[in-house]
Structures are given as structure tokens and as C-alpha cells.
Image (spheres, rainbow, N blue to C red):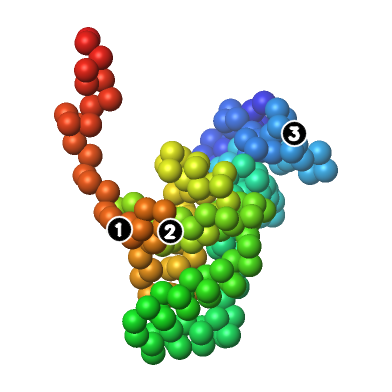
Amino acid sequence: MTCGRPRRADGRPCQSHRVVLPPLLGAQSMFRVTDIRLPESCCHHLTAAERALMDSLRAREAAELARIRAQIDPDPACWRWPVTAEHRARVAAIYACNGPVVRERSMRLLRDWQDGRCAICGTGVAEVTDHDHKTTLVRGRLCKSCNVREGFDPDGPFARYRLRYPVAILGLPPIRYYSPITGWAEPAAPYDRWRDNPMKGVGL
């Protein structure tokens, strides 16, 4: 369908294509807009009111796209949890302490703030203390499923969790990871593609 509105220069009808719905709201979409009549014009011959209509449709599409992305690839649950004045006061009190009590109180505040919720999915039970294997520092509490996936999934909510995790959100001092089985964590050795080659010794 062409525009048909007269050109300004010679008065002949415009042969440009008419404006169409944004892709997400278009005819092939399940979110198709059926209650709006589109202008019979190309983008160059829209009136001010028609431009406002198209801007509102684009805003509607952006909101719908953000909603879909949030369902498919949500942010970590801990990003939505509030840090209250009481939490900030407890953090300030921790910084005023010295010695092992700092780690003890930090871990207690972390557990209280998460309240048994997984920092990534928010629905699982936070049974595992997650830490960065490069720095040996605690990041937060995760359910067993998210803790396993976090080590293998480089994208999505796991990547965003690694950028802003519960210890950082609360502003706690660095907490070195300790396991009752293996003891204090040590930084992981840098990966050597020759020494750690998984195909070494296969005979190929």
C-alpha cells in the first residue's frame, strides 16, 4: 500500500509505502493491535497527531518487549529486595568491629537479609554459600540448582548476579569463603590450555 498523499513539490501522489505497526505489534504477532486505525500515509507525510500516535505505538511496543524479556531472562531476585535503614545500621556496626566477629556478623546479616531465599531465582531455598573461585570471596546464598548453573551459564541473570551480588548490595566487607570440609578457600590456579587440555592423553 502506497501513501497517496500529494508531494509538496509537484503535487503528484507520493508512492512511498504507508507506515505499518511496529514489528512486535504487527499483523503476524500475537500482540496485534486491533483497536487503532493507522494513518494512510508514509512517515514523511504524517500530521502531528499521527506522529504522536506512532510514537505511542512504539512506546507500547517497547513496554511489551521489556515485559517479555523480563519473563524470559529476569534480573536476579536479590536486585528487587530492599536494603532498609536497619540493614545499613548493622553494616556500619560491622565495620566498627575487628577480628573474626566481622565475618560472623556479616554472614549472619547476609542470611537475615536473604531470609532463606535464593539470590538468583528467589524461589529456591538458599542452602549453598556461593563464592568467587578467583578471589575466594563470598557473593551470596543460592539454592543448589542455581549454584550449579551459575558455574556454567555465562549469560542472563547469572551474569548480572556476578556483577551485583548480595554482599555488594548490602555493602558488607569482603568475606572469605570457608568450608567445614575443605577449610579456607584458595584462589583457583590460572587455566593453562596446554597443561589443562582435556584432550591430553587421549591418543589423537
Q: Which residue is mark 2?
A: 180
The residue furthest left is 194
**Drawn side of residue 48 relative to residue 153, left or right:** right
Q: Which residue is mark 3?
A: 30
Q: Earlier in the sequence, mark 2 or mark 3?
A: 3
Give how far apart the Cα atoms at labels 1 and 2 are: 19 Å
From this viewpoint, is residue 5 visible?
no
Q: Earlier in the sequence, mark 1 or mark 3?
A: 3
Q: Nearer the viewer, mark 2 or mark 3?
A: 2
Residue positioned 83% across, 43% down in the render: 35
Give how far apart the Cα atoms at labels 1 and 3 are: 47 Å
**Against 99, is 11 above or below?**
above
Percent coordinates x, y for residue 109 in the rendering: 53, 75
- Quadrant position of the C terminus in the picture: top left
The residue type indicated by label 2 comes to: Pro
Q: Nearer the viewer, mark 1 or mark 2?
A: 2
Q: Nearer the viewer, residue 18 or 156?
A: 156
Q: Which residue is mark 1?
A: 135
The residue type indicated by label 3 comes to: Met
Mark 2: few/some/many CA within 10 Å (<14, 14-19, 20+): few
Label 1 element class: loop
The residue type indicated by label 1 comes to: Thr
**Against 7, is 63 above or below?**
below
Residue positioned 77% across, 40% down in the render: 33
**Drawn side of residue 116 relative to residue 128, left or right:** right
Label 2 element class: loop
The numbered dot on residue 202 is none
Residue positioned 21% across, 44% down in the render: 190
